Amino acid sequence: MKEIPLIYEISNEDRDTISLPQDIEFFPQEELPKELLRKDLPLPQLSEVEVVRHFTNLSLRNFGIDLGFYPLGSCTMKYNPKINEELAHLPGFTKIHPYTPEDLSQGCLQIIYELEKLLCNITGMDRFTFQPSAGAHGELTGLLIIKAYLKDKGERRNTVLVPDSAHGTNPASAVMAGFKTIEIPSDERGLVNPNILKKYMNKDIAVLMLTNPNTLGLFERNIEEISEIVHREGALLYYDGANLNGIMGYARPGDMGFDVVHINLHKTFSTPHGGGGPGAGPVGVKEYLTHYLPKPLVDFDGEKYFLNYNIPKSIGRVRSFYGNFSVLLKALIYIKLMGEEGLRKSTEIAVLNANYLKEKLKDIFNLPYPSLCKHEFVLSGKKQKEKGVRVLDIAKRILDFGIHAPTISFPLIVEEALMIEPTETETKYTLDNFVSVLEKINREIEENVDIVKTAPHNTPIKRLDEVLAVKNLKVKWG
Ligand SMILES: *Cc1c(COP(=O)(O)O)cnc(C)c1O
């Protein structure tokens, strides 16, 4: 692929780029403070169409769900219906200021209110805060709520239990919230085993953080017993809802005994993500924890929606205003368009797609946990490693076929992990094509291993020296 020069490099002083009407009065430069004058800022001199082409070409060097299959396990890169964007771009939503008085923002408040009711229904929780901007932010918020609750009860519990299959944000959030963490090992089925869990329970345990289905895509089938064990010891159960899309419409964390949940709206409820956001990680709690939620909450007095600041034991704000409103809006649109039946169907197809791929791929790779999975599954590249090919090489080679690589090297309990989440929005044709790409790469490992070990070959940027990139970080132009 051809190099794209920097916009400054294609700029040419001879071009006459802008022509403004003569009768525009410019702000007299003499009146501006000298230090604010930006005389030598090299604005590129290009025609309009050259600017458009430059940025369109650049955008095509990136990868996104609209360009190809994106089976990035745990991240749920599903297709986001474009109608969500259309509606979220209506000026009534984009032009409203967060300080608009309640009387003039009834529609927006109603959106938050209705989304809360729907999420309570979907999860079996009693109230939600929408302030957290991502899953990890939700974890921190949820743990701060639990901390405030325990303190209020006069309890000193300092430890958070986290299974060894957990996402790294779980222990990180626990530490940020001021807890210690202890890791509990999964059993041979890849699950939290009640008998093992019991050995870790004591009066210092504040919370068990659990993802269900877990990061191996497996449903924690002993969840009721786990909940019993945790609560009997006076601890709470926290639900990492990043994988809610594997059970939505069929099972609810609230019914399983979870006290606090976060949901990644940008994963389960279809909002573009990747590249850093925006996301939303609303946190839901059971009734007895509602007075600790961040304020304000959105309430309805029978006539009007209003911002309720009367949350007596609130942990305070965890961000400005009411959260990432456009993400909330898109989640509401998605849920309403899908309906109850549609959400259940999306779960079914996500699970069907994952199991289909798992069965097709289990002979090429090693499948350490062969049971029925939910929305994702984890393979191991152990066999390939014996031939000198790491899972990183395979991931890089996949890019050559216009497909985003699956998540690799996570969860940590699987050697050479390849974590695949196809999502419900992909067709059988796409899945079959992915299988044939992996079969081809597996043949290459036998016949032409160099092509795998030096991949990618067809991407704008070839194999990076990742150590050098860390040690010699260069982020500045010029
Ligand atoms: C994505 C994810 C998180 C973190 O969520 P962010 O929205 O990326 O902060 C936590 N746990 C699991 C299992 C995840 O997949």
Image (cartoon, helix red, strand yellow):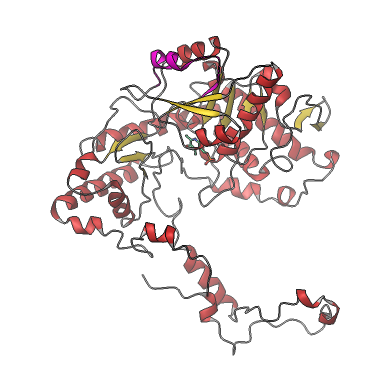
In this image, 83 relative to 451: left or right?
Answer: right
Q: Residue 306, image x and y in percent?
A: 81, 32
Quarter-of-image position of residue 282: top right
**The furthest residue to the left:** 447
Q: Is residue 63 magenta?
A: no
In this image, 80 relative to 421: left or right?
Answer: right
In this image, 116 relative to 436: left or right?
Answer: right
Q: Residue 392, image x and y in percent?
A: 31, 49
Residue at figure coordinates x 27%, y 44% from the top left: 435
Residue stretch in magenta: 192-208
Residue at figure coordinates x 44%, y 13% from the top left: 198
Assign the N terminus to one quadrant of the image.
bottom left
Q: Nearer the viewer, residue 373 or 232?
A: 232
Looking at the image, is 203 positioned above or below residue 54?
above
Is residue 357 visible to us here? no
| Count of residue discs | 0
Q: Residue 258, image x and y in percent?
A: 55, 20
Residue at figure coordinates x 36%, y 31% from the top left: 352
Is residue 256 visible to us here? yes
Q: Residue 351, image x and y in percent?
A: 39, 30
In this image, 63 relative to 387: left or right?
Answer: right
Looking at the image, is 478 positioned above or below residue 387?
below
**The furthest residue to the bottom:** 14
Looking at the image, is 355 positioned above or below residue 199?
below
